[in-house]
Amino acid sequence: MPRPLTVLQLLPALESGGVERSTLEVSAALVAAGHRALVVSAGGRLLPALLDAGAEHVALDIGRKSLATLGLVRPLRRLLAEQGVDIVHARSRLPAWIGWRALRGLPAAARPRFVTTVHGLNSPSRYSQVMVRGERVVCVSDTVRGYVLRHYPRTDPARLRVIPRGIDPAAFPRAPLPDRAARAAAAAADPRLGGDGPLLLLPGRGTRLKGHADALDLLSALRADGLDARLWMPGARDPARAAYVGELEARARELGLEDAVAITPPTSAIAAAYAASDLVLQLSRKPEAFGRTVVEALSTGRPVLGWDHGGVGELLRELQPAGAIPAFDAAALRAGAHALLARDAAAAATIPALPLRYTLRSMQDATLSVYDELR
């Protein structure tokens, strides 16, 4: 039996987001496989979940953008030696630089192996380049792999490993379409989500990059075409972004949509929100590295309509080509929505099951395999 590994993951904090979620998921997989999972971050609201998974946490604010953060190189180097770390896995740029410098100060024979994950399409720069310095560089999509090779052409392709982010299909079970019970529950919570027409869903945090204005324009067009369509945007309402929410509400009033749009805080029951909907939108104005919304929605059996760029376009072209719309083409978006909404229940039932490579278990197994490569 190979000996257990000690793997230390580096990230700024444990608040929320895809980086944090992946850290927890890989930590759980390490512990389940008999390894030791360490995490260095500033902590945050997800820390209890990390500890519940059996991981250990060391609080160092390695993501704070300050010259003082360089002072954490020595404490981290000392931690690596004291804890017998085998692999350092960096998931963000500043923590990666701190990790890189800590490793450089150790004797080569005692130096842990270095892994990085490129979670986003960061602006190419010397600062970002640290994310391709790993002995193995995990790319969360083929889009990211192409981006790395295009902007950092000296990167050895043999070091790159494409590991898509994964979801637990049991958490996003297939729902009937339409799911009248789920829709009724949504309407009971917010009457604006009622009616007999289709419900559009655009989940995402309250930032204009998520394309909420495009969704409002689409809703206006569909209603002008005679559909009693409604729009739910869970996650868009954020007290820290009150001005942006005000802009969306003003735009909805301008379009006469006040009674057909629900701009709400994040929901912990996102699978039920997918089930209540008839069509899920992914309209990010900036290309994303991956499109978790796409795989979550398809897992529940909901069609997805989105801009054909970045990781979202990659997923749609592979899994549901009819939903991939040329970026920012409002007329094509309108036509695509009509086409997907016009499908009957029998056609909707043909949405394929989620491929195994987009499951949580596959992501976890593939990441542990990368660690095994570096033993």
Image (cartoon, helix red, strand yellow):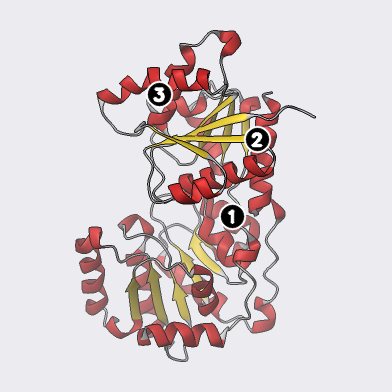
Tag in front: 3 or 2: 2
Q: Quadrant of residue 369?
A: top right
Residue 29 in the image: x percent, y percent?
Answer: 64, 44
Image point 47% across, 85% down: which residue?
185
Give percent across and percent down for residue 219. Answer: 38, 77
> In which quadrant will I find the N terminus?
top right
User: Looking at the image, which residue is at 62% across and 63% down?
Assistant: 320
Gap between marks 1 and 3 measured at Cα: 33 Å
Residue 24 appears in the figure: yes
Identify the element where label 1 is drawn.
Answer: helix
Amino acid, disc 3: Ile
Label 2: element kind: loop
Mark drawn on residue 315: 1
Q: Residues within 10 Å of mark 1 (few under 14, many from 20)?
A: many
Taking the image as shown, residue 317 lies to the left or right of residue 183, namely right
Mark 2 lies on residue: 35
| Rendered image: mark on residue 23 | none
Amino acid carrying label 1: it is: Leu
Question: What distance separates the C-alpha of mark 2 from that of mark 1?
Answer: 32 Å
Asked if 110 appears above or below 366 in the picture, the reply is above
Residue 254: x, y in percent? 22, 77
How many other residues sit within 10 Å of disc 3, few (<14), some (14-19) or many (≥20)? many
Horizontally, residue 129 falls left or right of residue 214, namely right
Q: Mark 3 = which residue?
A: 98
Q: Is residue 129 visible?
A: no
Task: Compare marks 3 and 2 and give the one earlier in the sequence.
Answer: 2
Disc 2 marks a residue whose amino acid type is: His
* Mark 2 crowdedness (10 Å alpha carbons): few <14, some 14-19, many ≥20: some
As measured in the structure, the alpha-carbon distance from the residue carrying label 3 to the one carrying label 2 is 24 Å
Mark closer to the chain start, 2 or 1:
2
Q: Residue 199 location, x and y as percent?
A: 46, 80
The residue located at (35%, 34%) in the rendering is 63
